């Protein structure tokens, strides 16, 4: 489905042929979310600081996952250039209050400047996160990557949709589970996930179907028990993340006719207690071409910042960004459903 003509870029309400049903489009759902904010005592949503610089190093990836909101894959060629990477490091140099560099993609490791960026950020004593699909650690040309990450004390946030092979392969492709297990064992050998090692290994769960994530603490216990019993694998924590109605996952919902029911599920599960912990309130997202966004999802929908004084990493204005009004949309229901969802897992 062409992203420029699919439902995610259309704002009108549609009706079925029998006029029995109104289809709620993204524009309608965005209004619904703003109404929910007002009812929860928030006239508008604002940032209150910037702790995290989340950088998309490109859409190139060695995998094509069914739930990917980035629409990443081996055929994508968008990649962050050195001048934008240098600008990101300069921002970290100027603003020590930004404590974390969060690297994502695609497979961020496939950017030729990935290692240089990691080293530069670590020299500035920043915490660095690598959002890793695990299978890249076994790919040709990346054999030394696990050791590099360990030597630089990079936190690995690794996608593992389920501790069961069938569910993982259904979302990420045949063979993804076995490769992920092999990669996790390699990381354990280097000390990742082990107490006192200082090397943090975080796993990420995404629902395989159209359900919301279960309780994060309970699921973490299940993962820990199953992975330990089956493979002896250790990890530090688990994040649960809701699938957002964006890009490839939205197209999937439309294709199977579950868009309205999934959106209604998110709306019904709205939790005002998740608002304070939304990641957009302490994070700025930078696209592969250097443009700034409120979050990774707004980036994929090309919903730019409201504040016109700073649009690019090259004109980064901390004060303006730390107090900016945040652009909201229908996907925000995903971040506020149930226990809430962010790149740091459950919120409430």
Image (cartoon, rainbow, N blue to C red):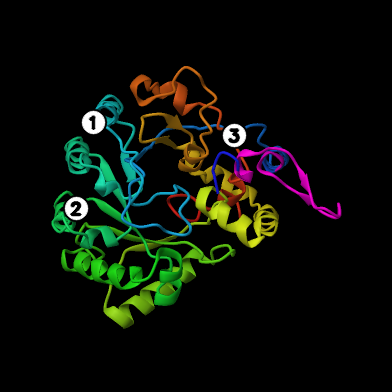
Location of mark 3 (residue): 45
Eyeballing the image, is 266 above or below 186? Answer: above
Residue sitting at 19 percent across and 67 percent down? 186
Q: Position of residue 234 (x, y in %)?
A: 28, 70
In this view, the mark in front (2 or 3): 2
Out of 2 and 227, give the one closest to the viewer.
2
Q: Residues within 10 Å of mark 3 (few under 14, many from 20)?
A: some
Tell me residue 221's x, y (percent).
Answer: 42, 73
Residue situated furthest bottom in the rendering = 229
**What residue did someone put label 1 on?**
82
Quarter in which the C terminus is drawn = bottom right
Residue 22 picture location, percent across and down? 80, 49
Query: Is 10 within the magenta?
Result: yes
- Marks 1 and 3, how far apart at CA: 33 Å
- Can residue 338 be seen from the camera position used here? no
68 vs 181, left or right, is right
Identify the secondary structure beneath mark 1. helix
Residue at 49%, 32% (x, y): give it. Answer: 48
Foreground label between 2 and 1: 1
User: On screen, 87 above or below 33?
Assistant: above
């Amino acid at each position: 489905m062409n992203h420029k003509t699919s439902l995610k870029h259309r704002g009108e309400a549609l009706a079925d042929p029998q006029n029995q049903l109104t289809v709620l489009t993204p524009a309608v759902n965005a209004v619904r979310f703003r109404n929910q904010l007002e009812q929860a005592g928030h006239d508008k949503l604002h940032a209150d600081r910037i702790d995290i610089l989340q950088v998309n190093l490109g859409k190139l990836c060695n995998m094509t996952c069914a739930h990917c909101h980035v629409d990443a894959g081996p055929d994508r060629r968008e990649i962050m250039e050195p001048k934008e990477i240098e600008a990101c490091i300069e921002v970290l140099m100027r603003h020590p209050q930004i404590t974390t560099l969060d690297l994502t993609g695609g497979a961020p490791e496939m950017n030729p400047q990935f290692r240089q960026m990691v080293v530069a950020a670590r020299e500035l004593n920043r915490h660095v996160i690598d959002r890793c699909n695990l299978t890249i650690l076994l790919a040709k040309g990346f054999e030394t990557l696990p050791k590099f990450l360990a030597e630089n004390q990079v936190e690995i946030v690794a996608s593992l949709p389920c501790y069961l092979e069938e569910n993982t392969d259904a979302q990420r492709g045949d063979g993804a589970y076995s490769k992920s297990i092999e990669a996790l064992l390699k990381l354990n050998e280097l000390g990742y996930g082990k107490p006192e090692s200082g090397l943090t290994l975080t796993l990420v769960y995404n629902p395989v179907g159209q359900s919301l994530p279960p309780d994060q603490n309970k699921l973490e216990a299940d993962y820990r028990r199953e992975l330990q019993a089956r493979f002896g694998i250790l990890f530090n924590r688990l994040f649960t993340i809701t699938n957002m109605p964006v890009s490839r996952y939205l197209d999937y919902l439309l294709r199977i006719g579950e868009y309205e029911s999934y959106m209604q599920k998110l709306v019904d599960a709205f939790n005002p207690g998740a608002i304070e912990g939304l990641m957009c309130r302490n994070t700025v997202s930078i696209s592969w071409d250097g443009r700034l966004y409120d979050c990774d999802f707004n980036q994929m929908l090309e919903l730019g910042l409201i504040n016109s004084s700073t649009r690019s990493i090259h004109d980064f204005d901390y004060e303006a960004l730390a107090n900016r009004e945040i652009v909201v949309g229908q996907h925000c229901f995903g971040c506020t459903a149930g226990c809430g969802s962010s790149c740091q897992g459950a919120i409430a």
